Amino acid sequence: MAKPPLSLEGYKAPDATEAEQGRPYDESETNRAWEDFLTFGDLRRKNAPVRGIIEASWQRSVEQGVNARGKGSHLVASPDDLYELRLKNDDLLGSSAETFRRVAAVLGDAATMLIITDKNAVVLEVGGDQRTIDAGHDIRLEVGAAWSETITGTNGIGTALVTGRPVHVHAAEHFSEGIKAWTCVGSPIRSPIDGSIIGIVDFSGPQAIFHRHNVALAVVAANHIELALSEKIRIERMRLLEASISRMPGMNSADGVVILDRFGRVVHHNDMASNRLRRIAQSQDLSIGMQLLPSSEGVLAADLAKGLPEGLREQRIEPLLIDGAVKGAMLVLASKPRVNLTGSRMAPTASAALLSAKEAVIGCSEVLLSAIERVERAALGRSAILLEGETGVGKELFARLVHAAGQKTGKEPFVAFNCGAVSKELLGGELFGHAPGAFTGATREGKPGRFELAHGGVLSLDEIGELPLDLQPYLLRVLEERAVYRLGDSKPRPVDVRLVASTNRNLKQEVAEGRFRKDLYFRVGVVKITIPPLRDRVGDVEILIDHFSRHFATTYSTQPPRFEAATMELLRHYSWPGNVRELRNLIEHLVLMTLTGIVTPRDLPEDFLEIAGQSPAVSPPSGHRPTSDGEEVARFDEMERRAIERAVANAGGNIATAAEKLGLSRATLYRKLHQYRSRT
């Protein structure tokens, strides 16, 4: 949208009180009135040449204990606080930049500095004549300084903020003696959303710059900033609507849809939404600008559902991201009640556990939601479940989801065990327990295994493909007989355990190659569910980046980083061989290591950039021959091989350290090393 010219055409001056009309400024008389005011607490002479707005401000300054002999602001924000303030006011600063440039052109060489403050009168930006800016340091009229009436008394910034009107304060009209050589004009900048004051635009300089038309210029400048803000909000609203389109698949055409901005306010809703809201929450009709979510300075809470009114917390709500940052949310008011797959038999504590387990699986892609739904349905039965998926996709989170969705009381145990994390000699005792003195190193009292510990609940066996062949018959026997025999003991111990096995191997191929028993494969895989890799979860990378950025920012007491568009493009198209675990580790690295708070491609680790440059998920250049499936697999294997060899080299050959860095178990890393080295 083209910007209108910066001029005074059509400008109508704000209404003025009688005390402000036709009252000539007399510096000596004003100073005498100020001395009387400080001495007696009021203007003793009836015809004192002091405007009503100034007298009222002097009165407030006295009541607030402002030092009349002060020399400007005495409160300046620290660099860290100022950085945070500028981030919170990013929209205001961005929308005022062009107006700053154009006002400077109008003023020419006038000895005037231009100032933008936040809603609390803290200076965020200065511009204009450099000599005047330098002189402003003497009274702390500078970036980071607070110029509210409570700090500096009567002045163009603070008084405009209190009155909500354009204000000029000329020389002796200031309350504090140390700033009486200055003239300033302040005009409020109002939010296009609700009309609240979000900042002040101010022109300040020596007495000689005073002219009444400067008030008009300040008003016009504020109006132009408000227009720029309105345009920014309009564009952001359109981008929120575009972002919501990718979340539409799977929705019912009769569902109510409400789009919220980053302030938690309604910016759009469809025709169904008002009826649904009345039915679900007995609320009034929706209106644009109505606030449904709490927001701190335009930042929504990480847990969106908890911020909703109580009657809406069971409804579907998803974050909407623009350039990698949460800029709003989409609330779906379902036309049909949400089905509780576990029925009325679920206790309140179990229901809370299910909600917590589902919230732990971050993402809204169609393939992920489909996997979640399959897991919830499978949890209704008692059959063993096999979760298949690449390393780092979050298989244990889905195992916990099985446990939560299948609970009745909320007290059933969940026991997780990684078959690749212990040696073959100790594995049997860990799984099945042992009798007293059953083998060298066994305890005198004996020890229950993981099956006994999981009695009545769920046993999650990760990397079941690492289970040695000679132990596989024992596992099969436990599953068939629903009883466990401790090593060295012939006494059966009944166990009621729901087995959830997981693997990153192709167990079917393992069976064909004789490394996994066929009968055990069919027993543990009664229900098989594939957890999708991150590269197939369209739209989830942005959501996970935001989630982990907030999480680690809270952990390390810092601000979540912002991501340049070019950086987000690289992250979106990366193939993520380490999946969610790799993304999590990368974001933790960036939160700790990015100094400016803005992540550029240069901030990404060298290893990441090297792999991303040949990632098969990156679209090939125009005219490039598409690769076959076999070539894609070969390229992926080569990429994984190089990453593994680099990690082992960086760890000085220490396999345990390299495995931890890669997010793999030692057994898996040994297997992959053997696999790749056998090909050379």
Image (cartoon, rainbow, N blue to C red):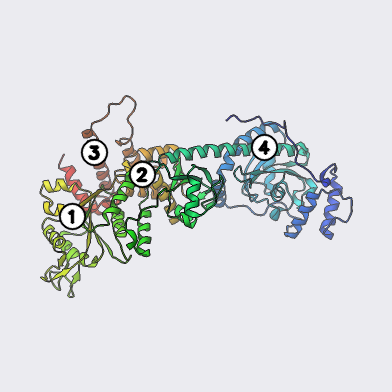
Residue at 35 percent across and 64 percent down: it is: 347
Q: Nearer the viewer, mark 3 or mark 4?
A: 4
Q: Quadrant of the N terminus?
A: top right
Upstream in the sequence, badge 1 or badge 3? 1
User: How far is the residue under mark 1 from the one under mark 2?
Assistant: 28 Å
Q: Quadrant of the C terminus?
A: top left
- Which residue occupies the extreme bottom position in the image? 445
Specify the amino acid type for callout 1.
Answer: Val
| Residue annotated with mark 3 | 638
Upstream in the sequence, badge 4 or badge 1? 4
Specify the amino acid type for callout 3.
Answer: Glu
- Which residue occupies the extreme top position in the image? 623
Image coordinates for residue 221, horizontal then vertical, percent: 67, 37
Q: Is residue 298 left or right of residue 484?
A: right
| Residue annotated with mark 2 | 365
Q: Nearer the viewer, mark 2 or mark 3?
A: 2
Q: Nearer the viewer, residue 339 or 264?
A: 339
Q: Is residue 367 left or right of residue 118?
A: left
Upstream in the sequence, badge 2 or badge 4? 4
- SS at circle 1: helix
Q: Nearer the viewer, mark 1 or mark 3?
A: 1
Residue at 78 percent across and 50 percent down: it is: 54
User: How far is the residue under mark 2 from the one under mark 4?
Assistant: 45 Å
| Residue annotated with mark 4 | 221
